Image: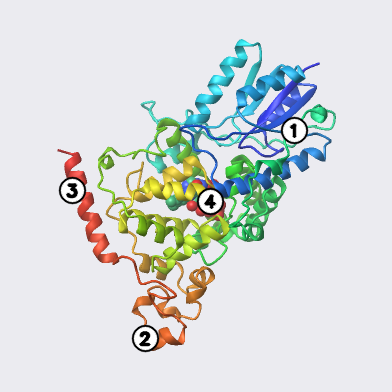
Amino acid sequence: MKKAIIWFRKDLRLSDNPALTQACEENNEIIPIYIYEENIPNAWMIGEASKWWLHYSLQSLCDNFDSFGIKLVLKKGNPLTILQSLLHETQANAVYWNRRYEPYSILNDAKIKQTLYKQGVKCNSYNGSLLIEPWEILTQKKTYFKVFTRFWNQSLKVLDIPNDLPIPELKKKNTAANLLSDNLNDWNLLPKHPNWAREFKKNWNPGEFNAQKKLMHFIENHLENYSKERDFPGCRGTSALSPHLASGEISPRQIWNAIKNYNITKKSKLLIESSNKYLAEIGWREFSYNLLYHFPKLPSDPFSDRFQSFPWKKNESFLKAWQKGLTGYPIVDAGMRQLWHIGWMHNRVRMIVASFLTKDLLINWTEGTKWFWDTLVDADLASNSASWQWVAGCGADAAPYFRIFNPVLQSQKFDPEGTYIRQWIPELTKLPTKYIHAPWETPEEILKESNIQLGINYPYPIIDHYEAKTKALDSFNRSVRNSSI
Ligand code: FAD
């Protein structure tokens, strides 16, 4: 009788799950497990908002397994110790998992593989979360790509995406029924007092089947206009699939195939253009993993050496104002409040707030990375680190440092009616559109009519953008000069 453990990690789904499918094909019985790890030095432990997501995502995975009469075993602690004890208890002789690419996971998985191998247990690992493994796309000189377009063009040349895998036959694989499992509620993944995640539930439905539903809804209703609407935070122009992807409730391969199949039936030029744009965004996710894999210090060290001694400023009160959405720049504040309230922020606004933190306030991008890590439901080490470095100007293929977003112009361009700002900053609801992007320029009587007292119920700008821009350029020029001496 062949028995195997399937170790779930960032692949909380039954369909298109290579480790699960393979384990089911090769074994008579399976034991699915999720292990919650805590307090690991030098690893990026799961942030608070992602814990919220994890709770509901695991609940959903438990229910899905349950509907096939299978129990998902939940355990908290050291994975190697837990796997060893479960192998012993069940007499299973193999472990299956889908690969992870964070530096800590790579080291830990290798250690687990080696140790279990010596004990006669085979560990089988698969690619369950990327279209292409980071070591598969290399330049002619066998180095990794540092420029997105080249990386993606090369990927498109060699990508051969197979059909995604259906949910495997699970009915007769019941094994774990008598095993002890933790109670999910005892892990305390949900916030208690204060419950800062009150609005999360209204905005998100974690779980594999909800992810699939959302994908199809997006494809049928929004994909065609994606390239026109994706930059406007006031409309629902993007898929909001990122937390589902980050937890592995859906795979990029499922997204790829669903879009390609839909396109075949429609054949519209705009749809094809938008689909390519959308898939290129999935490509940015792949590129971020490529960077993290080949440059594991991506979350902490600037990719570009020129930034090694950049004179970042420490300023607690600026950092707090940014985190709380009280900078006095409405588009920045709206973004930061959206993040706090629903654990997610529109991509265009992520770029604006990141530029503001690093270039206007001259605060180290790593502070932004940490805050996003804790507050995003889609927190993803590769995408978060690569994107922060990209905006700060120190990343691979980064926006040049001298391109400093003007928060007022960005706001006028991408939120022209102030829809997004009004949604997240109720204090400014009544302000006429003409002034909503820069309330400090509003005549006194209009401020009064709009119930706004600057400095009392909405702040004055904490910094003057033009002065900040001059300072930032000066710091950059000096830093570059010093690094090339
Ligand atoms: P869509 O526009 O619908 O895109 C589809 C998918 O493509 C996304 O779900 C995501 O998986 C991927 N994607 C889109 N844009 C990017 C990008 N620039 N880089 C990498 N992948 C991308 N994304 C995360 O998933 N986790 C993060 O922690 C994260 N941190 C970020 C931090 C900063 C400072 C910035 C500027 C961007 C960050 N992103 C991050 C990328 C991007 O903002 C989000 O993926 C996107 O906003 C998610 O919304 P969506 O699913 O509607 O995207």
- Pointers 3 and 1 in contact (C-beta within 8 Å): no
Element under disc 3: helix
Mark 2 neighbour density, 10 Å: few (under 14) some (14–19) many (20 or more): few
Cα–Cα span, label 2 and label 4: 38 Å
Q: Nearer the viewer, residue 247 or 271?
A: 247
- Pointers 2 and 4 in contact (C-beta within 8 Å): no
Badge 4 residue CB within 8 Å of ligand 1? yes
Colour mapping used in the image: rainbow
Cα–Cα span, label 1 and label 4: 28 Å
Mark 4 neighbour density, 10 Å: few (under 14) some (14–19) many (20 or more): many
The residue located at (73%, 45%) in the rendering is 60
Badge 2 residue CB within 8 Å of ligand 1? no
* Residue identifier under label 1: 181
Cα–Cα span, label 2 and label 3: 41 Å
Element under disc 2: helix
Element under disc 4: loop
The nearer-to-camera label among 2 and 3 is: 2
Mark before the other along the chain sequence, 2 or 4 = 4
* Residue identifier under label 4: 376
Mark before the other along the chain sequence, 2 or 3 = 2
Cα–Cα span, label 3 and label 1: 58 Å
- Quarter-wise, where is residue 142 in the image? top left
- Pointers 2 and 3 in contact (C-beta within 8 Å): no
Q: Which mark is residue 478?
A: 3
The residue located at (66%, 41%) in the rendering is 187
Element under disc 1: loop
Mark 1 neighbour density, 10 Å: few (under 14) some (14–19) many (20 or more): some
Image quadrant holding the C terminus, namely top left
Mark before the other along the chain sequence, 1 or 2 = 1
Q: Which mark is residue 444?
A: 2
Residue 53 rendering spot, x and y as whole percentages: 62, 48
Image quadrant holding the N terminus, namely top right
